[in-house]
Amino acid sequence: MPRNAETASYKFNHTMIRIKDPKVSLPFYQDVIGMELLAEKKFETFTLYFLAFNHDGKDLTPEEKNKQRFSREGVLELTHNHGTESDASFQGYSSGNSDPGRGFGHIAITVGNIEEACARFERLGVPFKKRLTDGTMKNIAFILDPDGYWIEVVPGSLEI
Amino acid sequence: MPRNAETASYKFNHTMIRIKDPKVSLPFYQDVIGMELLAEKKFETFTLYFLAFNHDGKDLTPEEKNKQRFSREGVLELTHNHGTESDASFQGYSSGNSDPGRGFGHIAITVGNIEEACARFERLGVPFKKRLTDGTMKNIAFILDPDGYWIEVVPGSLEI
């Protein structure tokens, strides 16, 4: 199907998932995964965090980062509903990969060297859903984010 | 947090959601949303469909499309578990936005002109979760995909 004039401006801007505790998830997505925080928007009952990979490594001003939120692809939005982080009765969020709640599957990051990437995740204590050596597909892995969402780790040059 | 050498190659490549029926979802994501099918990978019990916006409008060869699957950002992966489309007992997938199953929120597309985009979705009979005129945020809308997943429609120049 060729792209048409009516949708020519459209971009797949972001994916939103809910998180229990930004004090845990932000260091994970920034330090472990390597994304940059583009903006933090606090509302009365929730806060939104927008993250993305900074591909050219250039330092961006807060204004440039804020603008990128809706002008590029590959943005991850984390929604924190205030209070979940300290609510003993909070059951946690569904990863989308088991019933009830099955639907959403995962987000995926491509990496230049998957052996190095997975060795680093092991070293940093990141839990794995599937190591490179598990199952039949030896060239992809799945790690778990702090809320249990699956993150596929895949070589940028994968052929399946 | 500055980007570091270890994660410099990383990209937020794709987001995966499960779909009930590709005969319904593919026309939706191609014709209504305007994405291009990059690749279709059939396995014994499931088929994967990879889609993305073709931003420069250039015709791509099947090889170029296939390569883009893991070399760019903004890819949507649809997983079809064979049989759901004709299984009368299939309950459908969770959108992630209600209990049980709350977690995943939505994907978002940015558009050049949100009034035109929403008028077009209306004309095409796309169900809305939130019209521009609903609620307090008059500059964003939410439509529903064929499985009930929420798709935020947002101006590429939004300021919140």
Image (cartoon, coloured by chain):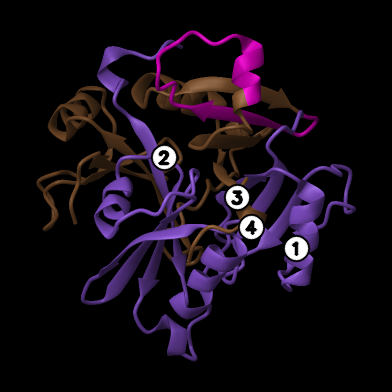
Chain colours: A purple, B brown
Q: Quadrant of residue A62?
A: bottom left
Nearer-N-terminus badge (4/2):
2
- Name the residue tied to disc 3: B8
Q: Are marks 2 and 3 on the same chain?
A: no
- Name the residue tied to disc 4: A150
Q: Residue A13: where, in percent of width, then height?
A: 38, 41
Label 1: chain letter? A
Label 3: chain letter? B
Q: Quadrant of residue A17?
A: bottom left
Residue at left offset 30%, top offset 56%: A61
- Residue range (magenta): B43-67
- Name the residue tied to disc 2: A73
Nearer to us: label 1 or label 3: 3
Nearer to us: label 3 or label 4: 3
Mark-to-mark CA distance, 1 and 3: 13 Å
Q: Quadrant of residue B145?
A: top left
Label 2: chain letter? A
Task: Tell me the SS state at disc 4.
Answer: strand
- Give the class, few, some or many, for how many residues have Cα within 10 Å of label 1's Cα (few <14, many ≥20): some
Numbered mark located on residue A120 in the image: 1
Residue at left offset 64%, top offset 57%: A150
Q: Are marks 1 and 3 on the same chain?
A: no
